[in-house]
Image: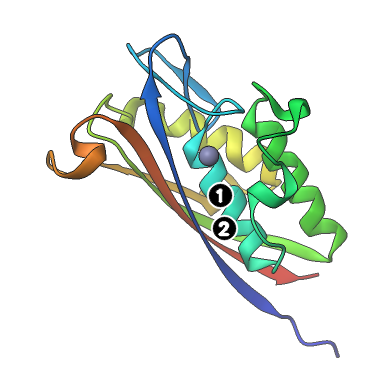
Amino acid sequence: MKKVQFRVGLGYDVHRFSRDRDLVVGGVKIPYEFGLLGHSDADCLLHAICDALLGAAGLGDIGRHFPDTDPAYKGISSLILLEKVVKLLHDEGWDIANIDSTIIAQSPRLAPYIDAMKKNISSVLGVDIGAVNIKATTTEGLGFEGKGEGIAAKAVALIFSN
Ligand SMILES: [Zn+2]
């Protein structure tokens, strides 16, 4: 009998705040005076999750697969990037067990949007909603997140061979 293989991966992403941009985190548009600056929709949580999944599968990182010099990805929803990452993993014979993640932002308050983020992410990953955990924290005013210069996100993913 073939032995099931497990792999873990880690993802980390940061985007700076900018005026005249929508704030999109976890595929949810959040009303706020700033958005995040980036080539795509700059969804730092989804980028961290993409990197965790790619890392677990030994497939490099998001910049390698979706370079920010490629006009095809300009303004693209990161839910589409996540969908492409999931396809890459499936093609390599990997299934996703679970995701845990933390969004680091002083403001806005993200708690009211976490259920909608979990719904978006679990449906793209094709896993139960309980397999996607999202936490939000501040840094008590310390560092770039605390000063309100941007948002960071960290994620870990566990995958297994199918
Ligand atoms: Zn990013």
Total tally of numbered discs in the picture: 2
Q: Residues within 10 Å of mark 1 (few under 14, many from 20)?
A: many
Rendering coords of residue 37 (x, y %): 47, 25
Task: Tell me if I can see residue 148 in this picture.
Answer: yes
Answer left or right for 40 relative to 24: right
Name the foreground residue: 148 vs 137.
148
Amino acid type, callout 1: Ile
Rendering coords of residue 62 (x, y %): 65, 49
Name the foreground residue: 84 vs 59.
59
Residue beneath label 2, please? 52
Amino acid type, callout 2: Ala
Secondary element under disc 1, as helix, strand or loop, is: helix
**Residue lying at 64% horizontally and 21% vertically, measured from the top left:** 75
Residues under labels 1 and 2: Cα distance? 5 Å
Task: Tell me if I can see residue 127 in this picture.
Answer: no
Residue beneath label 1, please? 49
The answer to the question of whether label 1 and label 2 lie on touching residues, with beta carbons closer than 8 A, is: yes
Query: What's the image's color scheme?
Result: rainbow
**Residue lying at 70% horizontally and 51% vertically, measured from the top left:** 64
Rendering coords of residue 161 (x, y %): 76, 72
Rendering coords of residue 29 (x, y %): 49, 18
Answer left or right for 102 relative to 162: left
Q: Does the beta carbon at disc 2 come under 8 Å from ligand 1?
A: no
Q: The N terminus lies in which quarter of the figure?
A: bottom right
